[in-house]
Amino acid sequence: MGATSEHGHGNDHHGHHHHEESWVRKYIFSEDHKMISKQFLITAIFMGIVAVMLSIFFRLQLGWPGEKFGVLNFFLGDKWAPEGVLDRNAYLALVTIHGTIMVFFVLTGGLSGTFANLLIPLQVGARDMASGFLNMLSYWAFAISSVIMIASLFVEGGAASGGWTVYPPLSALPQAMPGSGTGMTLWLVSMVFFIASSLLGGLNYIVTIINLRTKGMSMTRLPLTIWALLVTAILGVLSFPVLVSAVVLLLMDRSFGTAFYLSDIYIQGEALDVTGGSPLLFQHLFWFLGHPEVYIVLLPALGISSEIIATNSRKPIFGYKAMIGSILAIGFLSFIVWGHHMFVTGMNPFLGSVFVFTTLLIAIPSAVKGFNYITTLYQGNIRFTPGMLFSIGLVSTFLTGGLTGIILADSALDVNVHDTYFVVAHFHIVMGMSAIFGMLGGVYHWFPKMFGKMMNNKLGYVHFWLTLVCGYGVFFPMHFVGMAGAPRRYYDYSEFPFLDWVMNLNPIISVFAIVGAAAQILFLINFFHSIFYGQAATQNPWASNTLEWTTPVKHLHGNWPGAIPEVHRWAYDYSNPEHEEDFVPQVVPMKPGEHAH
Amino acid sequence: MKLLIILVIVLAIIALVQLTKVYDLTRSLRKTREEEITPADNKMNANLMLVWMIVFFIGTIVLYGKYHTYLPDSASEHGKDVDWLMDLNLWMITIMFFIMNAMLFLTAWKFHYKKDRKAKFFAHDNRLEMIWTGIPGVAMAFIIVFGLITWNKITGPASAEAIQVEVYSKQFDWTVRYAGDNKTFGASSFNLISTDNALGLVTREKIQSKLTEIDAEIETVKKQIEENKKLPVMPDSYIETLQDKIFRLQRHKQRILDLNENKTATGLSDWESGADDRIAKGEMHLPVGKEVEFIFRSQDVIHSAYMPHFRAQMNAVPGVPTRFKMTPIITTKEMRKKLGDDKFDYILLCNKVCGAAHFNMQMTVIIDSPEDYATWLAKQKTFVAEEKKEEPAAKSDTTATAMNNMGANAVVAAK
């Protein structure tokens, strides 16, 4: 795999002469992957703050229905929260935009955008991404889509309100609900930009990983972060185009009178002039992206945690090849399981059986990953850095949330818990909490690399424990609310006496949510304070093996001041008995007679 | 009040920032580095792992203790199978939940950093990998087989004796239609929906009245255009909108003329067999012990008919009729006695977000003894009877619509 050496040396001039860049080129329209990564991170943090605030607003209504809250009126105004009571349409808009921002803007754009940009060139040993220009476009498409999505909160009629899955006809007919007007159009336009961003980014990541690896960096020596990011990018490039077509067809149904998703509809006193379409077509297209999307969110987090857990256990990741195999298996299977979102749509039951089979197969590679994480910790020498804590938290949420997936994958059982709080609990734990933990862990771990400063550990500890306790406090009880038959996306449950006895959980859940959200302020303070006043970082603070820690603390355009280092071993030689030190960086040549892994 | 809250938040943040600074100062005095985790910190976090595990497990057991009877016993035949399977799965995943989390947190607790210990270099072990690929594989095989057996039972074809019930949804209520004495539903079409024909049932009279209604509407719009031509007050684009409306009405008319009449098994056509269909709103009665096949239809957006007590759910999709079958086995009366709750009712609720009032789109389901069911059904109006009774009202309705149109026109003209 030495083919890349040519490239590495050919790029050398980059590192040497340093022309001063204008402020705008350096901080705004930067083509440097490290700067773009920071741009993604800061944008995602902003979007995350918005999404968390929205969730607190609707948790107030769910916890104490009909109660008046000055804070709601303060933020949402007299139109959406008259006298401090949340409006019904506003409730649906909040739920929808919370989901959209979290899934796409924080956990897809934010997570992949930040860590793929930061880690891919640094860990494979490249001067920069294959195309810095496309990379810049990728960020700016993301920024535009973020602005449009936020703007949609302020339009007449409110933001999109049909749930983050925007099923037509509800989303296609402006007369169906206020949120299906301008807000929905902006949602769709924002998604088109978002998908453009993902595709530009994804192609760049794939090309960089395949072509720009330094000398000696064979595929089987890549850190697991890179494997996870590679498979993530492939999933994105294959599935996002399907979503863009679904979105464009929906735009046409809304604006140009086509009927891809519409048929036989009578609404607001009028029989619509559209026949022959099928609402189920949209669901198939949407979930063809939607399910791989779950793994687009999850895999980078799993990659990040593999790296952090190995480094801080001072042990090689257990079953490196099995971990790669399970990433590939999960990636492949994620394309043939989308129908499990549609068991009760009237889809052919036999087709349903096939999706039951493929979906439950995913449990096998997932279980392998879970056991491998635990075995990595076993007999290690664990340093509890904040990054490590979040990674261990991730393993717990991944296992806990994954197990309830077994029930949802079983179509016979899904019938009774479909679209209930059981589902909300499942995906918030397995996807939401896990991916957020991966992201936060990654920020704590690579903060020294991004900003040349250390974050404060003590604040990190408080942040982690509050987040873990509150996260489980919010989502774990929801399983029981769901099994008792409480549907999701309900504004108020007081019309259903049979649910009264589980609804006493709702105020408790809301309190956990508020405390958990407040705990994130600790992170924000730590993050921004450390950027300016944190302890200066050393070159390799965590005593880690991977290539990014061989670059100087101060960022260079081109990453390494001299030649790109050559790689001689895999990324996980921690506590190798053939060496004195408990870590052996990838750039250290093999000793005569040493066994490779 | 608002100011006070903001003030408190701002002060709290300032206090935290100050604390951080104090911490930074003491750290630089002690010359410790952030990446060197102190033994005390390692120990504390390791112990917290253990504490958290215990709290987490106790919390889980308390929640199970309190909420394990998540729903009353299934009131449907297939629901018993579903509950059995659910219990089996819940037991399996709960046990796995405890084992895996205990392994994780105990390992993290036990192997925290010690200065003189070197971690064991243990990179892979094929035998272990085989074990934890194989065991989940076998477990999944069992789950898949049991799951699919139940799934096939639930989704298999309904028997010939099954009572067919149409559940019709729109924003934001449910209507039920029973096939009547001839046991055959009349045809329906969204093109014929009007105030006196909420389900859009097809009969010759309904077709005629709808066509008349559309013709009248076309005439009204044409008149509006004529008036505007005489005295042009509106812009051309408005005229185009009106002309477009005429085209749409004409297409609507054509769609009605295109409707086909089909023979049914009863010898009547499907335009005739609907005359004795019985329609009920707000309540759905079903007989105990008889298989029921639901046919779900929707008028506007996707709804979902969810009956948690029967472990039944199916989406209602506009343009695509869907089906679900079940056999109720416990009457409402029996269930009330069982639960000791006189006010208990089975319920059908909407479980696919459908608009502002989605959270209250419900219908009571009542399971009767076959005799009570027959009595109740006989009291429900048949479609034709209802139509005859409401005919005068329907006429005035058409006039009202026409007047409304003229009124709207007057408003627009006044602008």
Image (cartoon, grey):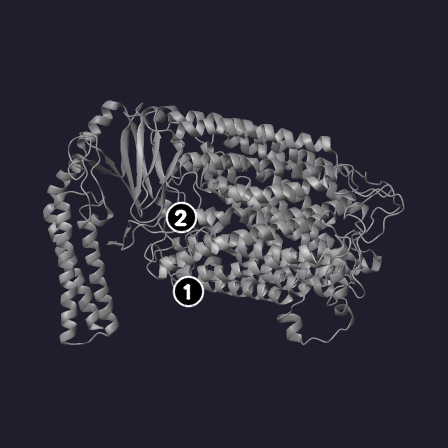
Secondary structure under tag 2 reads: helix
Q: Where is residue B407 in the image (x, y as percent from the top left)?
A: 17, 64
Q: Name the residue under label 2.
A: A281
Q: Name the residue under label 1.
A: A155
The answer to whether A90 appears left or right of B263 in the picture is right
In three-dimensional space, the C-alpha distance between marks 2 and 1, rounded to whole angstroms, equals 29 Å
Alpha-carbon neighbours of circle 1 within 10 Å: few (<14), some, or many (≥20)?
some
Q: Which residue lies at the image location 72% right of the left edge and 76% below the top edge?
A: A20
Question: Chain ID for label 2?
Answer: A
Q: Where is residue A460 in the image (x, y as percent from the top left)?
A: 69, 52
The image quadrant of residue B31 is bottom right
Q: Which of marks 2 and 1 is nearer the N terminus?
A: 1
Q: What residue type is labelled 1?
A: Val
Q: Which residue lies at the image location 59% right of the left edge and 51% below the top edge?
A: A234
Q: Where is residue A89 in the image (x, y as percent from the top left)?
A: 39, 55
Alpha-carbon neighbours of circle 2 within 10 Å: few (<14), some, or many (≥20)?
some
Is residue B247 something that shows in the picture? yes
The image quadrant of residue A328 is top right
Q: Which residue lies at the image location 50% right of the left edge and 32% below the top edge?
A: B67
Q: Which amino acid does label 2 sit on?
A: Leu
The answer to whether B197 appears left or right of A429 in the picture is left
Is residue A437 something that shows in the picture? no
Q: Quadrant of the C terminus of chain B?
A: bottom left
Q: Which residue lies at the image location 68% right of the left edge and 53% below the top edge?
A: A442
